[in-house]
Amino acid sequence: MNIILLGPPGAGKGTQAQRLVAERGMTQLSTGDMLRAAVKAATPVGLKAKAVMEAGELVSDEIVSGIIGEALDALDVGAGVIFDGYPRTAAQAHSLDGILSDRGRTLDHVIELDVDEDALVERITGRFTCATCGAGYHDTFKQPKVAGECDVCHGHEFKRRPDDNEETVRTRMAEYRAKTAPILPIYEERGIVSRVDGMADIDDVAKAIDAILD
Ligand code: ADP
Ligand code: ADP
Ligand code: ZN
């Protein structure tokens, strides 16, 4: 089973992907996470991507499709893949078709998280993650069960993304509207798009996604 989680920044893609990994053993491929790792390690890709990401613009299609292909070959993806934050342009959607067919894989579902843009700024400015294991949290909507301690790894260090500020979020939303939302018809034609109310509580979004996958 291979699926795409599609939605603007802050829609809840990473949150739902992490849950699917924990509950179903699927593999999350987040181009955002992979690019941030490349920036941190100052690899050639990271050096190219850093300023683009800080501005909230899109990294080149060649770079992101390249890292997706490499990740598919390097990881154990037997239980299926969740594409999180990829594809984001029509060119990436076409690349993904080739990447999957080269590897004998098909796309089963594209799940669109439908959200109200006004709520996204609050979601994004309140977002933080565990510095050790990457588990995602929110100041208001998803605090760790024990204050200051990660639910998953019990780590005590958390971090916030430099691009999670109101100004950059507006650019990222505009990029989504201009370049990513227009790829939906490609998948609608294939009859594999499902829409989920992303404004519901995290657990209710999870239930709606499970109903599509089961
Ligand atoms: P994305 O990966 O789509 O950018 P995230 O999954 O990181 O989004 O979610 C953005 C922030 O909103 C996180 O802090 C997360 O804890 C929180 N969040 C995710 N889903 C919901 C939801 N359904 N309701 C309220 N807050 C949510
Ligand atoms: P969010 O889900 O909050 O929008 P991501 O973590 O998916 O954020 O992406 C963060 C940044 O990384 C994007 O703003 C963009 O600069 C870059 N990026 C991630 N995925 C892609 C992609 N598929 N194509 C181009 N740029 C990407
Ligand atoms: Zn942790």
Image (cartoon, rainbow, N blue to C red):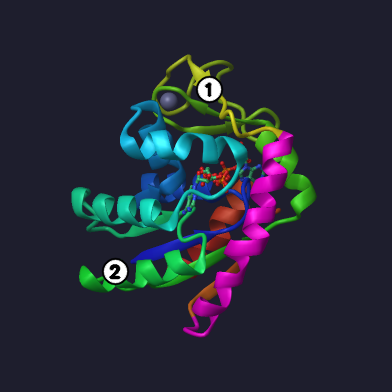
Comes first in the chain, label 1 or label 2:
2
Kindly identify the amino acid type of the residue bearing the numbered disc 1: Lys
Q: In this view, does 64 lie to the left or right of 76?
A: right
Q: Residue at x 48, y 34 (%)?
A: 50
Q: Residue 11 carries which label?
A: none
Secondary structure found at label 1: strand
Q: Residue at x 37, y 56 (%)?
A: 62
- Mark 1–mark 2 Cα distance, whole angstroms, equals 33 Å
Q: Which residue is drawn at 60% across and 42% down?
A: 56
Dot 1 alpha-carbon crowd within 10 angstroms: few under 14, some 14 to 19, many 20 or more: few
Q: In this view, does 70 lie to the left or right of 84?
A: left
Ligand 1, seen in the image, is in the quarter at top right
Q: Nearer the viewer, residue 120 or 49?
A: 49
Mark 1 beta carbon near ligand 3 (under 8 Å): no
Q: What stretch is highlighted in magenta?
A: 166-191
Q: In this view, does 2 lie to the left or right of 198?
A: left
